[in-house]
Structure formats: structure tokens, C-alpha cells
Amino acid sequence: MTTTLITGANKGLGFETARRLLAAGHTVYLGCRDAERGRRAAEELGARMVLLDVTDDASVAAAARAVEADGGLDVLVNNAGIEARGDGNAVVGPAEVTGELMRRVFDTNVFGPVRVLHAFLPLLLRSPAPVVVNVSSGLASLTRVSEPGTPTHAYPGVAYPASKTAVNMITVQYAKAFPTLRINAVEPGFTATDLNGNTGVQSVAQGAEIIVRMAQLGPDGPTGGYFDIHGRLPW
């Protein structure tokens, strides 16, 4: 049976991804930093909960030990992320963004996946078909953000897209270093979640589709790519 860990999984895209992968026969760990919320989500889904704060090295290491003791890991979904909006759900633009805000966003969105990968990579590499899905964003595409007249061009924020562009680079470098690993970045689309104040235009069921698809790749699947539901995206 395939064993999967999803970070930030007690709600939103992570929760829906867990629900879908459980239905597909996976054993799923919900990686949650809030023990009570994680417990309730795991009970609702019939999943396992592991306490995991992606911003804390000790928490991540303890989660890796717990998953290893239960038998190992085949699939990792790096889903935990923040956008850090301002008052009134305002996107923080170049005139307002600070180094501290950038650090906070990168700690979760960039350093978080690296911490988790570092801790869980030994387990993944023991799997006959290891898979990693890094939840990125269409805002990570320098090509798309540079195209006038598009929604991505209109987005004024700095920290969130910069963090997701870094996630894309991490994806490429891990794919080159570990050729047996299927590791890809995905764009779920503008999904209504707490991250954006539920302003997204699609449901979590729609947003989770590409995550679920890429989490079920076989050993002959693509690696080092950047995808949405329609196919490859431009970097």
C-alpha cells in the first residue's frame, strides 16, 4: 500500500488531497502543526495525524521518526504555505513589503519544503516508487507574471510569488540530484482557501485535481517539471 504524507493537511487543498488519496487506497498522514485540529481532521477522514510544523527543525525530525517507525513513506506532498496578506485581506505590494514579511513567507513556503525533504528523503529513497509534489503557484512563472493583460501580471504581491519561484528551482535541483524520485511542482489554480481569504474562483475539489494526479505518478512519470491541470507551464 502507498503511504503518503501531506503537510498543512487539516483544511483546504491539503485536506481535499488527503480525502482523494485515501479513496484511491493510500495510507495518508496529515502533517499538522495544531494537534487538536489535526486530530479532528484525521478522525473525519480516517487518516493518520502526525504533528509537524514545517518552520521547526525539531518538529520535522520528530515527524520523520514517527513515520519511519510506522513503516516508511512513498509520497510526500509539500502543501503547507502562507501568503501573509495585509489589513482587509490586501495583497502586500512592493511599496509595503518588508524583509521581515519576506522572511516569514519564505520560512514556511521555501525553507519548510527543504526541511521536510531533508528529513524525509532517506525514507522516500527506500521506496520502490518515490514521489514528491511541491505545491507551487501560477504566480511562480516569470513568463506569466511578465505578460501584460493577464491575471498573473496584475497581481502586485512580492513575497508569495517569489517564494513559489524558489520552490520551482528547488524542484528542478532535487530532480537532477535524485533521478529515481518523481518530483514536480504544481499550480492548483486560484482556489478559494484561507490562504487568500477565500477569494479564489474555484473549489478545493478543482484545485486538488493536479496535486492528486501528480501524487499518483509511476516510475516512468515526468520529473523536474511544473504543471497545472492542462499540462506543462512556462518557467
Image (cartoon, helix red, strand yellow):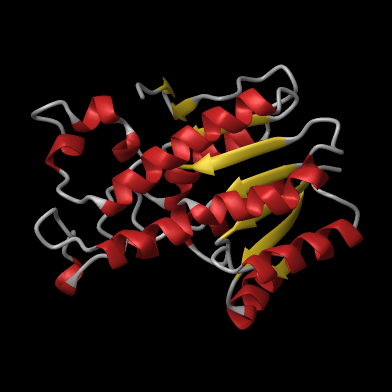
State which quarter of the image contains the N terminus. top right
Q: Residue at x 41, y 56 (%)?
A: 106
Image position of 55 (left or right of 159): right
Provide residue 10's location: percent of width, then percent of height: 57, 67
In the image, is residue 145 above or below residue 1?
A: above
Observer-nearest residue: 211 or 129? 129
Image position of 148 (left or right of 84): left
Image quadrant where residue 47 sits: bottom right
Image position of 4 (left or right of 54): right
Observer-nearest residue: 197 or 235? 235
In the image, is residue 53 above or below residue 106?
A: below
Image quadrant where residue 196 sits: bottom left
Q: Residue furthest bottom?
A: 36
Image position of 39 (left or right of 8): right
Q: Is residue 188 visible?
A: no
Q: Residue furthest front?
A: 99
Q: Residue at x 47, y 48 (%)?
A: 205
Observer-nearest residue: 42 or 60? 60
